[in-house]
Image: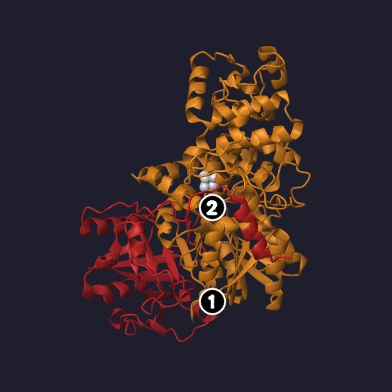
Chain colours: A orange, B red
């Protein structure tokens, strides 16, 4: 074949012209990896430890199986699901392609409605702004609605450092916070905990920070939920400042949207005098009408419900109703860097529904902590190295934390082709590591294969029909799969490394035209 | 030194310098929605889907609302109720005789609201495919805290307020108003991903469909 695998990085034709463009002086900066995750071992190493934790594996398998079933049932109810996905992707692409325009429009509408807009280049700046606002209001505590953005910037740590208590109010976040733990799932951060563990945490910890759990607390979910209700109510009623994120920020109206279940969001968004919302710049939606698409896609993909119990919308300040002091902090923190890659920018469409986590065979076994970030699962495997670069062990290894089975793409409500992005990132990792090493060429070939569905299908056919090039055992040694297979506690048949295999089957100089990897598209679960 | 705002916008502009299509290139926002077979079928679907969340749903005629409200309060043992200023007074007429304490919303604090058992509100829109009621917190629904802090919410929905699908509801809503979309009582899926009703929002939701 004449196409050079190196061509893979070319942007899709039509909508985009030139290649990635650097900021006039320098490329947009990466996110700084926080101390929490610095020095994290590679995904494969961390996953191996997680695999040994049978309790966690059982908790995860149970939870993800439950949610997969629910999601499938409610998605099947919607005849136009595929159309909705296309429309959802188009809405986010419209925003991402013209992000400065929509952000300025959002700012204008928010300001006109009485909100104050702040801009933060990175986590540190965002934290400084929020801490400053809280201090100016003489508050020594804030109530918080679950928000990925504030986790990402580690706002709680910054607030605590300034002597301000940050109370997480989402049940799962509360479990994580009281358990001195880290989140392991986007939607259900305490998914790795079962009811008995939650009961123990509540009994042990609640009294330390407020109203203790009832002594006769059982591990019935309803009783556990009630304990959280009682524990947090006093905090809701007295809090002067709340901190939230936003699922959507509508440019043409200035409306912020928070999607939740428990009512803790409503409490935070309604009762305090001051509301500070930390919003990643990619959260913008062009128009209010786009909510018609997103509010159909998100709940069904996320909790597997026709609609989540509560969705709150507010547009600046509403006289006589809710917080009268409303702030919005728009955060970059590496997003402009991701946006500069015309292929990789698709990841910014993500609406954090977590469907890709729930269908991922790798996530189900490895758990969320191995991803070394607040963004676990398939989307984390893509987004973390994009936001933070591939300097650390964990970020270098994340693009390989996948069997490329494609289930995540099928589940994604905004059609992010995660497997293709992973392969795209693998080429970057290899390029950075060893220039044009043999693996680099192999990865590029893989990237080339995955970049085009026809080629991928042809490759899969080839692999199924005769295992023409790879035979029946070398599947485990292709890039990515090999890495994952080695992290499993099962015997891995191939004795040779990828490098050895490549040399044996192709000779040292072979493979530059990408034809050598026709079998890479095989579903990892069948290997 | 440039401000954060200028610098971020500058970076984002540079990052999208390759994009050649103009703003709004995708055209009209597509409206993807299910259409109801009939108004009646839509209302029936609404009732079914609200009940599926384990909210209590009853249907009644226009002159039976007061009885249905009284019934809902009695069933849950709610002995005090906060009344939004613009609520149809006939809906809560006679409650006082039942011994239920009526609390008009005279700038009640959150602590005071926490002492009240229930709230009765109207709504703006009902959505059938999702079993959702949307409040826009006009005077017949009251400010957001009223339908949040008391543990029991009785919501009256007119059949003419029920639309079939989510996009149709947006056409009836004003984005400049605060809004709460409610689908069943407060719930959580945070323990082993199983839905449990009853966390911070009202644990009891009664929906009265009128007409
Ligand atoms: S990548 Fe897609 S499926 Fe995964 S969390 Fe984001 S929107 Fe959901």
Residue B98, labelled with which disc? none
Left or right: where A84 falls relative to A278: left
Residue A133 x, y percent position in the rendering? 68, 73
Q: Secondary structure at mark 2?
A: helix
Disc 2: which chain?
A: A
Of the 4 image quadrants, the one containing the N terminus of chain B is bottom right
What residue is drawn where x is 43% and y is 62%? A288
Q: Secondary structure at mark 1?
A: loop
Residues under numbered marks 2 and 1 in contact, where contact means CB atoms less than 8 Å apart: no
Q: Tell me which corner region of the image, top left, top right, bottom left or bottom right, holds residue B90.
A: bottom left
Left or right: where A35 falls relative to A2: right
Q: CA distance from mark 2 to mark 1?
A: 26 Å
Q: Tell me which corner region of the image, top left, top right, bottom left or bottom right, holds residue A514.
A: top right
What residue is drawn where x is 42% and y is 41%? A72
Label 1 CB sits under 8 Å from any ligand 1 atom: no
Residue A516 x, y percent position in the rendering? 60, 18
Neighbourhood count class around disc 2 (C-alpha, 10 Å): few under 14, some 14–19, many 20 upward: many
* Residue that badge 2 annotates: A96
Towards the viewer: A486 or A500: A500
Towards the viewer: A478 or A448: A448
Judge whether residue A44 can be spotted in this image. Answer: no
Which numbered disc, 2 or 1, marks the residue that appears first in the sequence? Answer: 2
Q: Nearer the viewer, mark 2 or mark 1?
A: 2
Label 2 CB sits under 8 Å from any ligand 1 atom: no
* Residue that badge 1 annotates: A114
């Amino acid at each position: 074949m004449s196409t050079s695998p190196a061509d893979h990085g070319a942007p899709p034709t039509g909508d985009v012209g030139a290649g990635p463009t650097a900021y006039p002086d320098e490329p947009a900066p990466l996110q700084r990896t926080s101390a929490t995750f610095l020095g994290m071992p590679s995904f494969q190493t961390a996953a191996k430890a997680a695999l040994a934790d049978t309790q966690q594996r059982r908790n995860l398998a149970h939870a993800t199986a439950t949610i997969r079933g629910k999601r499938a049932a409610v998605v099947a109810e919607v005849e136009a699901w595929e159309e909705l996905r296309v429309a959802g992707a188009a809405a986010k692409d419209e925003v991402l392609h013209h992000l400065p325009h929509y952000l300025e429009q959002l700012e204008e509408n928010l300001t006109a409605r009485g909100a104050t807009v702040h801009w933060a280049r990175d986590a540190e700046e965002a934290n400084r702004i929020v801490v400053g606002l809280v201090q100016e209001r003489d508050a020594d505590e804030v109530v918080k609605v679950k928000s990925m953005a504030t986790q990402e910037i580690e706002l709680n740590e910054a607030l605590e450092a300034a002597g301000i208590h940050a109370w997480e109010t989402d049940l799962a976040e509360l479990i994580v916070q009281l358990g001195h733990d880290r989140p392991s799932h986007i939607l259900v951060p305490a998914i790795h905990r079962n009811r008995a563990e939650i009961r123990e945490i509540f009994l042990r910890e609640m009294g330390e920070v407020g109203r203790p759990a009832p002594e006769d607390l059982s591990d019935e979910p309803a009783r556990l939920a009630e304990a959280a209700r009682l524990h947090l109510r006093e905090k809701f009623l007295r809090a002067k400042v709340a901190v939230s994120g936003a699922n959507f920020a509508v440019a043409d109206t200035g409306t912020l949207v928070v999607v939740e279940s428990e009512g803790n969001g409503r409490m935070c968004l309604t009762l305090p005098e001051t509301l500070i919302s930390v919003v990643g710049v990619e959260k913008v939606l062009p128009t209010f009408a786009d909510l018609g698409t997103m509010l159909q896609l998100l709940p069904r993909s996320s909790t597997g419900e026709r609609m989540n119990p509560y969705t709150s919308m507010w547009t600046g300040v509403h006289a006589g109703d809710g917080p009268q002091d409303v702030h919005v902090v728009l955060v970059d923190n590496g997003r402009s860097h991701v946006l500069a890659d015309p292929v990789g920018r698709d990841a910014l469409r993500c609406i954090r529904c977590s469907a890709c986590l729930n269908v991922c065979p790798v996530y189900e076994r490895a758990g969320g902590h191995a991803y070394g970030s607040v963004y676990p699962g398939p989307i984390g495997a893509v987004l973390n190295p994009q936001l933070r670069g591939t300097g650390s062990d964990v970020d270098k290894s994340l693009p390989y934390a996948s069997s490329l089975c494609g289930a995540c793409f099928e589940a994604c409500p905004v059609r992010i082709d995660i497997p293709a992005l992973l392969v795209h990132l693998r080429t970057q990792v290899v390029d950075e590591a060893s220039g044009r090493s043999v693996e680099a060429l192999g990865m590029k070939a893989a990237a080339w294969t995955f970049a085009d569905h026809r080629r991928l299908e042809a490759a899969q056919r080839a692999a199924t029909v005769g295992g023409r090039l790879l035979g029946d055992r070398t599947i485990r040694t292709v890039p990515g799969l090999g890495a994952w297979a080695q992290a499993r506690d099962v015997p891995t048949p191939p004795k040779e490394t990828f490098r050895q295999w490549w040399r044996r089957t192709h000779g040292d100089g072979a493979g530059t035209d990408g034809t050598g990897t026709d079998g890479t598209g095989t579903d990892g679960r069948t290997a | 030194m440039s401000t954060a705002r200028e610098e971020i916008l500058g970076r984002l502009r540079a990052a999208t310098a390759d994009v050649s299509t103009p703003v709004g290139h995708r055209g009209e926002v597509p409206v993807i929605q299910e259409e109801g077979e009939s108004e009646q079928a839509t209302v029936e679907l609404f009732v079914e889907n609200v009940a599926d969340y384990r909210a209590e749903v009853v249907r009644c005629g226009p002159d039976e609302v007061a009885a249905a409200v009284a019934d809902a309060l009695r069933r849950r043992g709610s002995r005090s109720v906060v009344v939004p200023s613009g609520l149809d007074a006939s809906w809560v007429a006679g409650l006082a005789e039942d011994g239920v304490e009526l609390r008009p919303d005279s700038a009640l604090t959150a602590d005071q609201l926490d002492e009240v058992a229930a709230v009765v509100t109207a709504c703006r829109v009902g959505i059938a495919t999702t079993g959702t009621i949307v409040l826009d917190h006009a005077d017949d629904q009251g400010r957001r805290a009223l339908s949040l802090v008391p543990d029991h919410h009785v919501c009256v929905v007119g059949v003419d307020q029920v639309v079939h699908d989510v996009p149709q509801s947006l056409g009836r809503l004003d984005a400049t108003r605060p809004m709460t979309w409610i689908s069943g009582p407060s719930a959580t899926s945070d323990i082993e991903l199983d839905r449990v009703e009853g966390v911070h929002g009202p644990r009891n939701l009664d929906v009265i469909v009128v007409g």
